[in-house]
Image (cartoon, grey):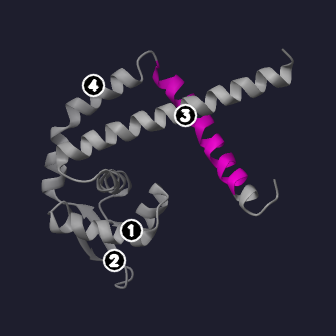
Amino acid sequence: MADRERLDRALSDFIWNIVEIHSQIEEIHKSWAQMLGVSEPQWLILMAIDELDESRGVSGIAVANKLRIHPAFVTNQTKKLEAMDFLARRPSPDDARFLQMSLTQKARAEIAKLTIKRQALNSTMFDGLDQASVDYLNKRLTSIAKNSRLASQKLSIGVL
């Protein structure tokens, strides 16, 4: 087999592995969401807010960018999460036209209840990988994600 064919096969295998991982992680997120009594997108919004919040609140735009979804969808879902007492939304101290969101104590308590299960799940998923391996993998995946966004843009404008 020629070098180009081996590379093409390896890239194809890599992409199918990513598809499989994405599918499994989606199922895991559905399970976490069910345990919390929310939808999968709502679970992801809560996780994004939890990760992005540095005790100042998080904008809907920041959440939308993190999840690569439309800001209007974030607004719609965060209103529902607020009604469920999972989120607090208040005007930004910098610009009152914008809202800052943060998890409520109820949300933090419910998420904390899942911590042991989440840690066990992570141990299973990343069995055999040490910190250095995960760091290396994250750097490579970040680069691939950036390059895939560029490739997608090129494809959409007909450059490829």
Which residue was labeled with disc 4?
120
Mark seen at residue 73: 1
Three-letter amino acid code at the position of disc 4: Ala
Label 3 with label 2: CB-CB less than 8 Å: no
Taking the view exactly as shown, the residue that stands out farthest to the bottom is 97
Rounded to the nearest angstrom, the CA distance separating label 2 from label 4 is: 37 Å
Label 2 with label 4: CB-CB less than 8 Å: no
Query: Which is more toward the observer, 39 or 66?
Result: 39
Query: Which is more toward the observer, 58 or 126?
Result: 126
Three-letter amino acid code at the position of disc 1: Phe
Q: Which residue is drawn at 36% across and 51% down?
A: 51
Mark seen at residue 92: 2
Mark seen at residue 18: 3
Q: Which residue is drawn at 81% across and 53% down?
A: 160
Rounded to the nearest angstrom, the CA distance separating label 4 from label 1 is: 31 Å
- Element type at marker 2? loop
Which of discs 3 and 2 lies nearer the camera? The answer is 3
Q: In this image, 54 relative to 113: left or right?
A: right
Vertical arrangement, residue 35 with respect to residue 8, above or below: below
Q: In this image, 21 relative to 5: left or right?
A: left
- Element type at marker 4? helix
Give the total of numbered labels.
4
Q: Which badge, 1 or 2, is on the more N-terminal residue?
A: 1
